Amino acid sequence: MASKRKSEVKVVIIGAGIAGLSAAQHLQQNGFQKITILEASDRIGGRIHTMAFGKTESDLVDLGAQWIHGEGKENSVYRLAKKYGMLKPLIRLEWGTGVCCNEEGKEIRQELVDDAIDKGFEIETELEKVYRRNRHLSEDELTIQDFYNKRFDQIVATDFPEVDREDAKSVFNYFLNLMRFDNGDDLRHLCSRNVGQYRSIGEKEDVCLPYGFQSVINALLRLMTKVKIILECAVDKIIWIDSKNRTNDVKMICADGTEFIADHVIVTCSLGYLQKYHENLFEPALPENKSQALYEIGYGTVNKIFLYYDEPFWTKGQGTIRFAWTDKNRDINSADEWYKAIHAFDEPHNNAHVLVGSVVGEEGKYIENLDKDEVSRICTQQIRMFLNDDSIPAPRDVLVTKWCSDKWSCGSYSYMKQESSESRRNDLSQPLYNDDNKPVVLFAGEAYHKTRYSTTDGARSSGIDQAQMLVNFYTNQCRRSF
Ligand SMILES: Cc1cc2nc3c(=O)[nH]c(=O)nc-3n(C[C@H](O)[C@H](O)[C@H](O)COP(=O)(O)OP(=O)(O)OC[C@H]3O[C@@H](n4cnc5c(N)ncnc54)[C@H](O)[C@@H]3O)c2cc1C
């Protein structure tokens, strides 16, 4: 095979989310000069999407990623944000502000709330160890939901006095909804054995971007002087082995018929997108181990609800309302009881007029089709009921995200379900090689990272890893040709 100089190698990247941009930046840094990003939508950022919501342009909301999970040098997004001064002022996720109430309007004492939440996090740590120690699980511990419920029952009976047990159970119900949000789907779909494959960074401190997560995207864009980005350019077909013409290249055909030829393509479409469209996207079809892996990794829906108030009814810094349903009312019997899946309304740090809540799983999908007024009415009713205060105003405006029906995301982020395994994640991230043993199709994105899946850090790291694979390929090729 003729060796090519890196500056001559054409790389197409599908998707201008953080994985695609990070891959492009890394390639550029290492001497590649012919890099084109094809992005289906009309904006850059993918599941990172900051927008103005309120009276002024500086009233921001993050529709997708909001937190950098894990403050520490090992976190590639934290490193980038810190290097370019995007973390000033430093805002850490704080626990314990605001109130925690049940649906009867009873505020649960803070000390009890803190105690129960600490126990919840201890169970999470225990869950993480199951994987590392390859511990045996009994039938009633296999899903995360079962695991927590079993432990909660034990803890309530042993660690809380009779008089506090009902409240402790309610706080655990809040905690389960919080874990749904963290894990990205109904906890009955998540596998206890595999939780520990995810690697936390530091002491699990989360920090937020004061000017929205888009500031990370903007920083990356400023670094990319040699990268061409084409928006509204959806790739419909990737011909990675052209048996007719016997070329060594890969061809992309876009929805409008435009064709791009490259030496390599890095595909950063979400797992949900590939689950839905891979059969038509790749020619020839994906090898079976890869297509199988696509379905064996879970991909859920998390949607956010933003409530905008002209005059906030809460004291700044104390606006969080945690919903601690009592056991008798906690079950969600059908998706139209979606409001029971909201763990809390919180104050985002970059918008003093907004409260944000999230709804996950089937209920999360359900709210995408609701009328704004209906969401406003039900959220107001819920806040009034839990705060026991009928004078709480209705929000002036409501914004509901639609990550599941977003054609290019098809959901929110990946997780480990019963069928998932480390080797399946590995299958997902393996490149496709053509007959000349050239990695023609590479895969990057949050779902393709073995230990930091679901996060922006995982997405960025996997973009860099795949780009590095190409750097190595050409470095080795160059050595071979001497
Ligand atoms: C509600 C929500 C909250 C989240 N919260 C956090 C958080 O707090 N912290 C955190 O770290 N992570 C969070 N995440 C996850 C994080 O947003 C993602 O892990 C990360 O942004 C994924 O980046 P990516 O580059 O892998 O994929 P994407 O951002 O999805 O990028 C893929 C790009 O490919 C494009 N595309 C798809 N198909 C095609 C095609 N056929 N042709 C051309 N382009 C195509 C898409 O339009 C998209 O721009 C959250 C996600 C959601 C939805």
Image: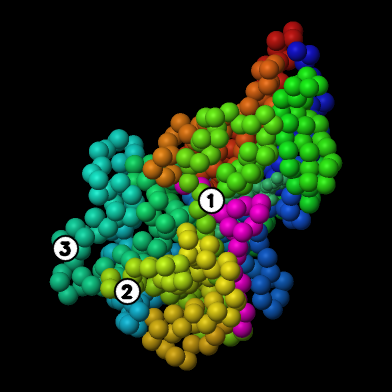
Q: Is residue 413 left or right of residue 189?
A: right
Q: Is residue 339 left or right of residue 287?
A: left
Q: Nearer the viewer, residue 38 or 110?
A: 38
State how far apart marks 1 and 3 are (Cα).
35 Å
Residue 224 seen in the figure? no
Q: Look at 62% across and 35% down and name the residue there.
A: 443
Q: Residues within 10 Å of mark 1 (few under 14, many from 20)?
A: many
Q: Residues within 10 Å of mark 3 (few under 14, many from 20)?
A: few
> Is 352 inside the magenta-drawn segment?
no
Q: Is label 2 in contact with label 1 (beta carbons under 8 Å)?
A: no
Q: Is residue 48 above or below residue 226?
A: below
Q: Which one is in front in this view, the residue at disc 1 or the one at disc 3?
A: 1
Among numbered discs 2 and 3, the one appearing first in the sequence: 3
The numbered disc on residue 53 is: none
**Rendering coords of residue 170 (x, y %):** 30, 70
Q: Which residues are magenta?
A: 396-415
**Rendering coords of residue 427 (x, y %):** 52, 31
**Rendering coords of residue 157 (x, y %):** 16, 63
Q: Look at 68% across and 17% down and name the residue there.
A: 435
Q: Is residue 411 above or below residue 3?
A: below
**Rendering coords of residue 120 (x, y %):** 31, 58
Amino acid type at circle 2 is Asn
Among numbered discs 2 and 1, the one appearing first in the sequence: 2
Q: Residue under label 1, please give it.
A: 413
Q: Residue under label 3, please give it.
A: 157
Image quadrant in which you'd find residue 139: top left
Report the predominant secondary structure element of the magenta stretch: loop
